[in-house]
Amino acid sequence: MTIGIDISMLVYRGSGVATYTYNLVIALLKFHPEHKYKLFYSSFRRPKNFNYLNEFKSLGAKVYNYYLPPSVLKWLWNKKNFLPIEWLIGKVDAFHSSDFLRPPLLSGTLGITTLHDLTWKIFPEFHTDDIVFAHTRKIQKTIKYQDLILVDSKNTAKDLAACFPDTKLTNIKVVYLGIDERLGPVKDEQKIKTVLNSYHLEYPLDYLIYVGAIEPRKNVDLAIRAFASLASQDKFQEYKFLLIGRAGWKNENIFKLIAELKLKDKVIFVGYVEEQHLATFYSAAKLTLYLSEYEGFGLPPLESLACLTPALCLNNSSLTEVVAPKYLTFKKDPSDLLQNMIKLIQNDVSEAEGKKIKSQFSWQKYADEVISLIISRI
């Protein structure tokens, strides 16, 4: 069986969809090498240290590297429905689309897409108009051609069925994401010091952490207010709050809030962190704050727990499925969140719990299920 995958979203390294794309491809190549893989990558951009394409090639994939910008592909695929992907990469049995583009496929090719969430439909105010249009257009084509739709959670499956009643429920399959196998507790203090120092952070350092895009839906402003409440306590006044991830959009208010709360020396924008360093950042943190308004899955809390660092999340959307109740709260007031934060900081995550999470959410399981679903449809 030959499977095609659009990996163009890797250009947005540090984003959730880029992380997903990388892990999907690696898992398929590693655990199901009996199949052939044709990877389509198209972008003018090449982030620093962009070695994914060579890594995929070394594992047996064939990479088709084009320099068509997303704007051109949006016009060709979403608006004109022209240029079948097979004209660019050759015949495939199935093709997995990227985040918001679904190319035309030749007769007999199974279309596959992963729908991570429906924030663009449920919370359009958190997105730009062009993103809302692109996602809407893609899901309409996905429904029309009865593609196999992979969703990250039961909550997303429910949202999809409610927002798009024409979707055949038999085409929606819930497959839980996996945790990067490189993530686990790091206890070597010298390694922690070396990694933190490489990002211009002093060691030792007591800190809370947020991992993800800095955008409205993520409630980073709420997390900062909650941190301010914590840092006002004598016991925690030396703590810092590290924000890891890309800047996202509509984040001007975040900088104003930090200045307003006089936290310029306490809230640190680390930016993008190399995948191999994430485990160290999680492990050395006292707590992960992830107070998102809505998630299709929510990997960072699980990644944190796999590294034996507690996480505090709001009790909503898919987070109620994948995160244990003791890490969830309905309270959004910073003073109420303070009590939850202190409680979690004072209670370690057990090694048994960390191992259980890694075994429950694995990319090998994900790859096995995806291959099984594709075979059942071809």
Image: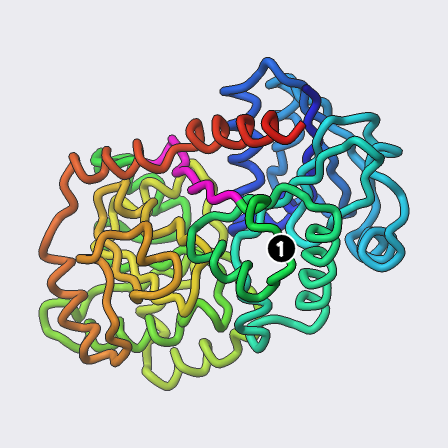
Q: Nearer the viewer, residue 330 or 111?
A: 111
The part of the chain drawn in magenta is 173-183
- Give the x, y percent position of residue 88: 85, 33
Going 27% across and 41% down the picture, which residue do you hit? 307
Apparent side of residue 306 relative to residue 68 in the rendered image (left or right) = left
Where residue 317 appears, x then y in whole percent? 39, 62
State yes or no: residue 178 in magenta: yes
Question: Which residue reaches farthest top?
Answer: 34
- Residue tagged 1: 167
User: In the structure shown, which secondary structural element does the residue marked by tag 1 occupy?
Assistant: loop
Residue name at image x 25 percent, y 80 percent:
333
Q: Quadrant of residue 211?
A: bottom left
Residue ranking furthest to the bottom: 260
- Quarter the C terminus occupies: top right
Point out the image quarter for the N terminus. top right
- Residue 83 visible in the shown view: yes
- Specify the quadrant of the image occupied by residue 325: bottom left
Q: Residue at x 65, y 26 (%)?
A: 54
Vertical arrangement, residue 19 with respect to residue 75, above or below? above
Chief SS of the magenta region: loop
Q: Is residue 206 visible?
A: no
Residue depicted at 78% across the width and 34% down the height: 65
Q: Specify whether 152 is left or right of 62.
A: left
Where does the image place residue 72, in percent across and percent down from the top left?
85, 54
Does residue 9 show up magenta in the picture? no
> Is 356 rendered above or below residue 62?
below
153 or 85, which is in the foreground?
153
